[in-house]
Amino acid sequence: MLICTVRDCRLPLARGERSWTCAAGHTFDVARSGYVNLLQPQDRKSKNPGDTLEAVQGRRRLHDSGATQPLLAGIRDLLQPSASEAILDAGCGEGFYLGSLAGTNGHGVDISIPAIDAAAKRYPGPQWVVANADRLLPYRDASFDSAMSITARMHVAEFERVLRPGGKLLVAVAAPDDLIELRGAGREDRLGRTLQEFATFDLVAQHRATCHADLDEAALQGVLHAIYRPLTKPPTAGMRVTLSLDLLLFRRRV
């Protein structure tokens, strides 16, 4: 279901032994860890776009600590993915949510090579792709039964294009109290703006998933790297932090 990302091409890609190729002859090699890089020069603003390796490792440590399991449970309960449905995670990062919810019918895309490489190594079942999902989701029209955007930027028209009629879309945005102990109060409430952005979808359900995690100094350092918070006053001891997501379940109109 992949399409070519070379400018003005968009032809379907066919999988070979170690590469993907379109009918126009554009070829994309499969990395040793199993992902394919479809990112084009015009789709990046820097040499190494997206999450850094340090940020990826910070998020991975947070997930591995078990702190985010209640958030995963909230996403699973709302989306209720089945083993047979094709599911897309746009802005999948290091793959925790998709890798925990989907098998070989899962498809994750992110602009960060370190993030996708980490996802492919940890979760070999789904298909992992490096691409700029803010501009183009590199998949054919109506490819997916469901899709997710977990605290990632969102291209509404592209979600409409790649979802099948009646398909589900789960959008998670950081709630105002998410990591309030590290970020401070006064965080923007993104819920209302997100509802406006997805006005062409039908809202099916919404839920706020909130939990608290006791993190040691190393885990806190990882979180700060992951959210790109300036380390002007690094933590010198562990502390309890709030993890909170506003979850919105939409359905693509038929």
Image (tube, rainbow, N blue to C red):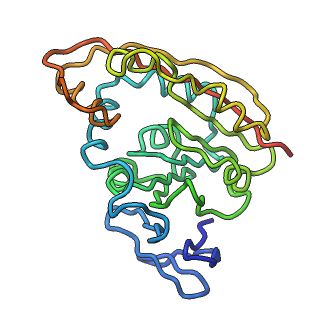
Residue at 63% x, 77% y is: 8
The percent position of residue 231, horizontal first and vertical second, equals 21, 30
In the rendered view, would you say 72 is above or below 208? Answer: below
Name the one closer to the observer, 77 or 160. Answer: 160
User: Residue farthest to the left?
Assistant: 236
Total of numbered circles in the picture?
Answer: 0
Dividing the image into 4 quarters, which one contains the N terminus? Answer: bottom right
Give left or right: position of 121 versus 18: left
Q: Nearer the viewer, residue 156 or 207?
A: 156
Q: Residue at x 52, y 21 (%)?
A: 175
Residue 198 appears in which quarter of the rendering? top right
Depicted 46 relative to depicted 239: above or below: below
Q: Is residue 6 left or right of residue 37?
A: right
Can you tell which quarter of the image residue 182 is in?
top left
Residue 47 vs 11, above or below: the answer is: above
Residue occupying the point 58% across, 81% down = 22
Q: Nearer the viewer, residue 31 or 171?
A: 171
- Residue 128: where, in percent of width, then height? 46, 57
Left or right: 200, with 33 as reference point: right
Q: Answer left or right for 138 relative to 235.
A: right
Tell me where residue 65 appears, x and y as whole percent: 29, 26
Q: Closest to the observer: 88 or 49?
A: 49
**Residue located 51% across and 41% down the image:** 152
Residue farthest to the right, as pictured: 254
Q: Residue 195, percent across and down?
A: 70, 30
Vertical relation: 185 (above or below) 26: above
